[in-house]
Image (tube, helix red, strand yellow):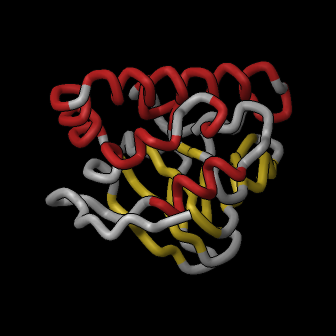
Amino acid sequence: MTTSTAPLPQGSHDVSPLAAAIARNTDEGGLGKFLESYRWSVLAQYVQPATLPRGHLLIAQGARERSLYFLESGDLKVDTKTSAGLVHLAILGPGTVVGEGSFFSGLPRNASVAAYSDCKVWEMGLARFASLAHEHPSVALALSQALGAVMASRMLDVSKRLALT
């Protein structure tokens, strides 16, 4: 197997470790089952990397921001506050996505997501998604369909239903 040494397009990042993590994620409803890895060469222009230390709050329950996050490495903890107290919903590993519910709906976040260990995530905000849709509509459509499939899969699993952030 040879590695390409071609330069990345202007504004792109090397997302190959993220694409590999997504491909390795075999969870039911995993993003890799619905989004072909070759599309990441385009998506690389529309995501921003962030390194999160353990304990960092990525998504706050009730927040109205609409970013979408792809997890390359580490683990994220998903919790929600209820009248009965704090409820732990999930630990998400590499190759998963969070934030898809509010990304599409515009509704407040229904859970908090924090770094359970040191993590690397990739963020895509609405403005970048709008640019992607304008410049590469087929990739935006594929991403939307993949995220819709992930959400549908999570909705079918009662234990994950609340974790749509």
> Which quadrant: the N terminus?
bottom right
Residue 158 screen position, x and y as percent: 84, 26
Residue 4 screen position, x and y as percent: 38, 65
Looking at the picture, does residue 133 appear above or below residue 96? above
Counting labels gives: 0
Whether residue 100 sits left or right of residue 84 in the image: it is: left
Looking at the picture, does residue 12 appear above or below residue 119? above
Residue 119 screen position, x and y as percent: 58, 71
Residue at the (62%, 39%) spot, across then down: 32
2 or 132, nearer to the observer? 2
Residue at the (57%, 57%) spot, across then down: 71
Q: Which quadrant of the view contains residue 131?
A: top left
Residue 113 screen position, x and y as percent: 61, 55
Looking at the picture, does residue 9 appear above or below residue 49? above
Whether residue 139 sits left or right of residue 88 in the image: it is: left
Residue at the (39%, 54%) spot, across then down: 123
Q: Which quadrant of the view contains residue 8?
A: bottom left
